[in-house]
C-alpha cells in the first residue's frame, strides 16, 4: 500500500464524513422541526418512544444527534427522563439504516436491476440533480433536497474511495496479523469504541469497517467485537454534551452509555457462550458490507428487546449514579438549551413556545393588575411582581438565544419567524412593566383610600374595556399568526388614543369645577398614560407581524399606508369609535 493510497483513504474519509453531514443537515432542514415536535409529544409509551426515536434517527442519519437532542429536551424540562430512555434505544436502531445504505455499494452481478441499484450507477445522476437544485435555488425545500442528493453522492463516493484505497492491504501480511489481534473481544470492543469516539459517529465508523471488508481479510471474529464497541463509542458525544447541564440531562446521557455497555456484555456473552459450546461455522469467514450491516442491526435489535422491559431499572441506575440534589428554580433551569441551535427547525419551535408563554404571562399580568384598581389585594400584587421578574428573565433568555439563532443558516420562512420574535419580546416585557405600574397605582389608591367620582369610574370602565380588547386580540393574533386579526389592532389603537385625549379634557374640567382633587388627578392621568402605552405596544406587535409577512420594514411608511390608503382601516376605526362611546 503506497503513500498515495493513504492519501486516497483520507480523501475518501473526508468525502464520506462531509457527505453524511450534508445529507443529515438537509434532511433536518427539510423536516423543519416537525420530527422533533413528534418526539416531544408522542413519547408517553415506551414502545412508541423507541419507534419514533428509530424513525427520526433513520431520517437525520445520526444517533448521536438524536441522543444529544434528548439531552437537550430533558435539560430544558420539556421531556422526562423516562420518556428519553425509549428514544435513546430507538436511536440505536435507527442508525443501522446507514450501514444498509452503504452496503448497496457491495452489490455484485451483471443483472440490470442489480446494476441500477448500485450507488455507482445512480450517485452521479443524484449529484448532478443536487448541484442544479443547490445552485439555482437560494432557499426553500428544493435547495434542501439538492443538499440531500449531494450529501448522498459524496457519501457513496467517499465509500468507493476508501474501499479502493484499502484493497492493497489484502496482500500485506502485517495487516492480516493486526486483524488477528482483534479476535480478542476486549481489544476489538476497545478499538471500535475508540474509533467512534474520535470521529463522533458510529455510522461513519461502521462505514470504515465496511470499506476495510473490501480487503477480504476481516472475519466475523474480528468484526463482531468492533461493531459492538462502535455503539459504545458513540456515547461520547452525548456525555460531552451533558457537561454543565441539569441532573436529569446528565442521567439521560449516562443511560445511553449504560444501555450500550450492558447490551454489549449481554450480546457478546451470549455469542461467545454459543461459540464455545456449539460453535458458529462462519466465525472465521470473511465479512462483506452486507454482513456487517446484518450484525450491526442484530446487535441493536437484541439490545433493545433485551433492555426495553428494564427501562425503569436503567432510569434507577442512572439516578443512583447521579444522585438527587435540591430542585432547580425556574431561574436556574435553562429555558432554552444551546444544543437546539444545531437543529434550527426545532430551536424555532421552542422559541415560539417560550415566546407564547411570555406573551400570555404579560397579558394576564396586565388584565389582573387592572382588577386591583377596584379591589386591591396584597397577595395578588406580590404574585404579579414575581411574574414580572419571570418575564424579564424570559426576555433575556429569548433575546440572547434568538440573536445566536439568527446567525445560523435559516430558511426564508424561519428567518421571518425569528425576526417577528425579536421585534416582539421587548413589547411584551414593557406591557408587563405597565402592569406593575398599575399595581403600584392600585396600591396607592388603597393605602390613601382615594375614591374617583362616579363619572370618572364610568369613563375608566370604557377605556379599560377597549385596552383589554386590544391586548387580548394582539396576543391571539401573534400566537396564531392571524394577519386579519392583526389588521384590526391599529384602528382600535387610534380609538384608544382619542379616548385618552377626551378623558384628559374631561378630567381638567372636573378639576376646574372643584369636582376632583389634584392628587386624584395625578392618579387618573397615570392610569391613562399606562393604558395608552400598552395599546402602543400592541400596535407595535401587530404592525411588526404584518410588516414581516409582507417583507416591509419601514414602520412609519407602513403605518401611513395602512391609515390613508386602505378603506378597511377607516371602517374598522369607525366601528370601534361607535363601540366605545363615553358616557
Image: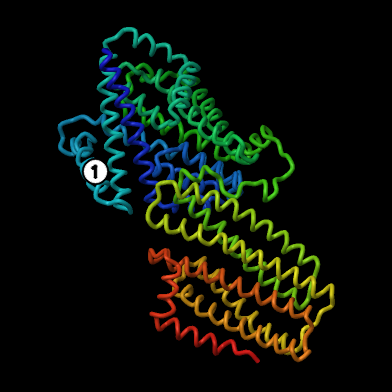
Q: What residue is rendered at 24% in x and 31% in y?
A: 107
Q: What residue is rendered at 61% in x and 82% in y?
A: 501
From this view, report whether residue 492 is shown above or below residue 310: below
Residue 575 showing in the rendered view = yes
Badge 1 crowding class, 10 Å Cα cut-off, few under 14, some 14 to 19, many 20 or more, is some
Residue 316 horizontal side relative to residue 70, left or right? right
Q: Quadrant of the N terminus?
A: top left
From this view, report whether residue 243 is shown above or below residue 394: above
- Report x, y in % for residue 556: 45, 70
Residue identifier under label 1: 131
Quarter of the view holding residue 526: bottom right
**Image colouring:** rainbow
Quarter of the view holding residue 429: bottom right
Residue 342 horizontal side relative to residue 214, left or right? right
Residue 99 horizontal side relative to residue 367, left or right? left
Q: What residue is rendered at 66% in x and 69% in y?
A: 366
Amino acid at each position: 500500500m503506497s503513500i498515495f493510497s493513504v492519501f486516497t483513504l483520507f480523501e475518501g474519509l473526508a468525502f464520506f464524513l462531509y457527505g453524511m453531514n450534508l445529507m443529515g443537515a438537509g434532511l433536518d432542514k427539510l423536516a423543519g422541526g416537525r420530527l422533533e415536535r413528534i418526539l416531544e409529544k408522542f413519547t408517553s409509551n415506551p414502545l412508541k418512544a423507541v419507534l419514533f426515536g428509530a424513525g427520526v434517527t433513520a431520517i437525520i442519519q445520526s444517533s448521536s444527534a438524536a441522543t444529544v437532542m434528548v439531552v437537550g429536551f430533558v435539560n430544558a424540562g420539556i421531556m422526562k427522563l423516562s420518556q428519553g430512555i425509549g428514544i435513546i434505544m430507538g436511536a440505536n436502531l435507527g442508525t443501522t439504516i446507514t450501514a444498509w445504505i452503504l452496503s448497496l455499494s457491495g452489490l455484485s452481478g451483471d443483472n440490470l436491476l442489480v446494476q441500477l441499484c448500485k450507488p455507482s450507477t445512480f450517485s452521479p445522476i443524484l449529484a448532478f440533480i443536487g448541484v442544479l437544485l443547490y445552485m439555482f435555488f437560494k432557499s426553500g425545500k428544493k435547495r434542501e433536497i439538492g443538499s440531500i442528493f449531494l450529501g448522498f453522492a459524496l457519501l457513496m463516493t467517499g465509500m468507493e474511495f476508501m474501499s479502493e484505497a484499502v484493497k492493497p492491504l489484502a496482500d500485506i501480511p502485517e495487516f492480516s496479523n493486526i486483524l488477528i489481534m482483534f479476535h480478542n473481544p476486549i481489544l476489538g470492543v476497545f478499538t471500535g469504541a475508540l474509533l467512534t469516539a474520535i470521529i463522533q459517529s458510529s455510522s461513519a465508523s461502521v462505514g470504515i469497517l465496511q470499506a476495510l471488508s473490501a480487503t477480504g481479510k476481516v472475519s466475523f471474529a474480528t468484526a463482531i467485537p468492533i461493531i459492538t464497541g462502535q455503539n459504545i463509542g458513540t456515547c461520547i458525544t452525548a456525555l460531552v454534551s451533558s457537561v454543565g447541564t441539569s441532573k436529569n440531562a446528565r442521567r439521560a446521557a449516562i443511560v445511553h452509555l449504560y444501555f450500550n455497555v450492558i447490551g454489549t456484555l449481554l450480546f457478546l456473552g451470549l455469542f461467545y457462550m454459543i461459540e464455545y459450546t456449539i460453535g458458529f461455522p462462519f466465525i472465521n469467514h470473511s465479512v462483506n458490507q452486507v454482513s456487517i450491516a446484518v450484525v450491526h442491526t442484530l446487535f441493536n435489535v437484541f439490545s433493545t428487546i433485551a433492555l426495553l422491559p428494564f427501562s425503569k431499572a436503567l432510569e434507577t441506575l442512572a439516578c443512583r449514579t447521579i444522585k438527587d440534589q435540591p430542585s432547580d428554580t425556574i431561574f436556574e433551569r435553562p429555558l432554552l438549551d444551546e444544543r437546539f441551535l444545531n437543529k434550527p427547525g426545532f430551536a424555532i419551535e421552542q422559541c415560539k413556545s417560550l415566546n407564547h408563554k411570555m406573551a400570555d404571562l404579560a397579558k394576564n399580568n396586565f388584565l389582573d393588575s387592572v382588577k386591583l384598581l377596584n379591589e386591591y389585594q396584597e397577595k395578588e400584587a406580590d404574585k404579579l411582581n414575581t411574574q414580572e421578574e419571570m418575564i424579564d428573565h424570559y426576555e433575556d433568555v429569548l433575546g440572547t438565544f434568538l440573536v445566536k439563532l439568527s446567525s445560523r443558516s435559516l430558511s426564508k420562512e424561519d428567518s421571518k419567524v425569528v425576526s417577528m420574535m425579536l421585534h416582539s419580546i421587548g413589547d411584551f416585557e414593557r406591557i408587563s412593566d405597565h402592569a406593575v405600574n398599575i399595581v403600584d397605582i392600585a396600591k396607592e389608591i388603597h393605602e390613601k383610600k382615594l375614591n374617583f367620582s362616579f363619572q370618572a369610574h364610568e369613563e375608566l370602565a370604557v377605556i379599560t374595556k377597549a385596552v383589554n380588547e386590544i391586548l387580548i386580540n394582539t396576543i391571539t393574533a401573534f400566537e396564531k399568526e392571524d394577519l386579519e386579526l392583526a389588521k384590526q389592532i391599529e384602528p382600535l389603537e387610534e380609538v384608544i388614543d382619542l379616548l385618552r385625549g377626551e378623558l384628559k379634557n374631561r378630567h381638567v374640567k372636573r378639576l376646574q369645577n372643584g369636582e376632583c382633587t389634584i392628587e386624584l388627578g395625578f392618579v387618573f392621568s397615570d392610569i391613562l398614560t399606562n393604558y395608552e402605552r400598552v395599546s402602543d405596544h400592541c400596535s407595535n406587535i401587530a404592525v411588526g407581524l404584518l410588516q414581516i409577512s409582507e417583507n416591509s420594514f419601514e414602520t412609519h411608511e407602513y403605518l401611513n399606508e395602512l391609515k390613508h390608503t386602505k378603506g378597511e382601516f377607516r371602517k374598522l376605526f369607525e366601528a370601534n369609535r361607535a363601540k366605545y362611546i363615553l358616557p
